[in-house]
Amino acid sequence: MPANNHIPLSVPNLSGNEWTYIRNCLDTNWVSSVGAYVEKFEKSVAAFTGARYAVATSNGTAALHISLMLAGTGPKDSVLVPDLTFVAPVNAIKYTGAEPLLVDVDKNTWQIDLPLLENFLEKETRQKEKSCIHKSTGRTIRAVLPVHVLGNMCDMNALREIAKKFNLLIIEDATEALGSRFEKKHSGTFGMTGCFSFNGNKIITTGGGGMIVTDSEKIAKHAKHLTTQAKSDPSEYVHDEVGYNYRLVNILAAMGLAQMELLPSFLERKKEVSDLYRQELSSVPGIKFQHTAQNVSSNNWLFTVSVPRHRKLIEFLRKNRIETRPLWKPMHRLKMFRKCTYISRNDVSSSLYNNCISLPCSTGITNAELLSVIKKIKSFYGK
Ligand SMILES: Cc1ncc(COP(=O)(O)O)c(C=O)c1O
């Protein structure tokens, strides 16, 4: 690798049938919101995840928004969501008029802190006619929305128990976790719906895109209806509720289908990248890796470590043409969510934000590139 080559953080790998399938859309003129690839892509995601149904959407945020609507979320409700996340699920909660209840994360797995969540529900809520009422606000807590941060997962059995006990629906933000499993069950298949994203930096990409998966035919049909402007007549322009233009177009679905064919190889490569980083960086003083429980198989989406002086390291690597990035600023520290309830004991999300850095981990990265990143990191720490 030439010394001045730029090493990006995470870029698409379009080495399969993308051109062939997209060309087929152009050749046949099926470029827009209907076409055979939409259904093929949906079927392929359903088959891969083991969900009965899949509904393609224009992006992951739209998948979350529609899922929250399908759960009946409205202005008198609240939804539990981790404090450490990309902002999209918290925005989606706001789109419905509901209030986010921000839950701190576990210091080892970086996922929603389940004992903390349960303690909050025990002390701060009461059950009324199969609804969970937040005592201090009188709001109904409609759902819990776990985010599988960086492709890792929390104990989904424990989360399901909690949700059952407190009458909460589960909507999974599995946007970063295509290919991740808890006890062999795929992310996104534990609750009412699971949401995926095919944004450019995700494990597979359609440029922009998303998917809702569910085992309920009723939910799937309603999701399709809402994402396609709620048209209720096959030929006439008659609509029966306020719908959305959240479709995924055929060209992008064609790309998605090609990417799904590559997903098993992407998962293998992501694991190799993570293993190599873990092995080679373990000697860096003060480094901490994200802990993955034994019954979780992560897709290793974006390799991230906690290290001393992480901002200085980001700057040092940038000067060496290596792209990295910090974690998301915790939601309770963003100005529009500052007044939201933040359920926390030690503000773990801020400590992770203050120490974590994501390293280059594209599926197309070479071992030579990885070793050069590792060498630079070690040199920064005088190793
Ligand atoms: C945790 C999380 N939720 C939601 C999204 C939103 O997905 P999209 O960008 O496809 O709308 C993303 C990423 O983009 C994400 O990382």
Image (cartoon, rainbow, N blue to C red):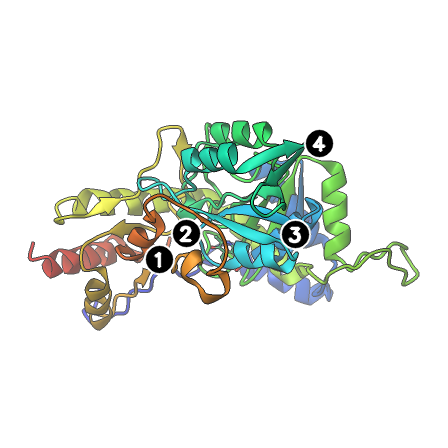
The CA span between labels 4 and 2 is 32 Å
Residue 160 falls left or right of residue 26: left
Q: Which quarter of the picture shows residue 152?
A: top left
Which comes before the other along the chain, label 1 or label 2? 2
Viewer-nearest residue: 191 or 199:
191
**Which residue matches tag 1?**
327
Viewer-nearest residue: 10 or 286:
286
- Foreground mark, 3 or 4? 4
**Which residue matches tag 3?**
56
Query: Hey, what amino acid is under mark 1?
Result: Leu
> Dots 4 and 1: beta carbons under 8 Å?
no
Residue 269 falls left or right of residue 47: left
Query: Hey, what amino acid is under mark 2?
Result: Leu
Which comes before the other along the chain, label 1 or label 3? 3
Query: Hey, what amino acid is under mark 4?
Result: Glu
Residue furthest front as drawn: 136
Viewer-nearest residue: 80 or 370:
80
Labelled disc at residue 129: 4
- Foreground mark, 2 or 3? 2
> Dots 1 and 2: beta carbons under 8 Å?
yes
Vertical placement of residue 103 versus 379, above or below: above
Determine the residue positioned at 56% across, 38% down: 48
Helix, strand or loop at disc 1? loop
- Foreground mark, 1 or 2? 2
